[in-house]
Image (cartoon, rainbow, N blue to C red):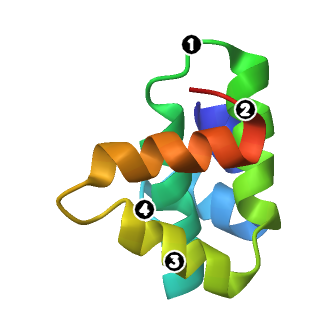
Amino acid sequence: MATTVYSHLPREKVKTLRTKGEVELSEEEGIRLALVVRGASALNDVSRTSSYAAAVYELIKEEAYYWFAKTSNGSARRGIRALRILLGGVE
């Protein structure tokens, strides 16, 4: 999954992450990263994980914030499942 995440971050941030072990993200980048990690954690197929991550990064800002809120509350499992189905047909 690290390769999937790295492919969506700017090069300078990937380089910083690899050398220092930490990187500063904007709020929006952090939300998108959280959506990728939450949704892809149950996916075993690399191609599905990559397509899911690509779809998350194609969401407009408001959609990303909406789905972050849906996957952060008490019914997070249902929100994650709904997002995976919406973005790639993956349950």
Q: Amino acid at mark 3?
A: Tyr
* Mark 4 or mark 2: whose residue is earlier in sequence: 4
Counting from the top left corner in percent of width and height, residue 12 is at: 74, 68
User: Residue 61 at what x, y percent from top left?
Assistant: 68, 84
Q: Nearer the viewer, mark 3 or mark 4?
A: 3
Q: How many marks?
A: 4
Count residues near mark 1 (Cα–Cα under 10 Å), then give few for <14, some for 14-19, many for 20+.
few
Nearer-the-camera pick, 44 or 86: 86
Q: Earlier in the sequence, mark 3 or mark 4?
A: 4
x, y percent for residue 63: 64, 77
Residue holding disc 1: 44
Residue 61 lies left or right of residue 40; in this view the side is: right
Residue at numbered disc 3: 66
Looking at the image, which residue is at 25% across and 54% down?
75
Q: Height in image: 82 above or below 40? A: below
Task: Say which residue label 2 marks.
Answer: 89
How many angstroms separate mark 3 from mark 2 (CA)?
19 Å
Residue at the (57%, 82%) spot, across then down: 28
- Residue visible at 71% across and 18% down in the picture: 46
Which residue does the image show at 76% across and 79% down from the upper left? 60
In 3D space, how far apart are the residues under numbered discs 1 and 3 (Cα atoms)? 25 Å
Which quadrant of the rendered structure holds the C terminus?
top right
> Which residue, given by chain and number where applicable, does mark 4 sit on?
22
Task: Name the residue type under label 1.
Answer: Asn
Q: CA distance from mark 2 to mark 1?
A: 15 Å
Which amino acid type is shown beneath numbered disc 2?
A: Gly
Based on the displayed image, in which of its 4 quarters is residue 58 positioned? bottom right
Nearer to us in this view, 87 or 38? 87
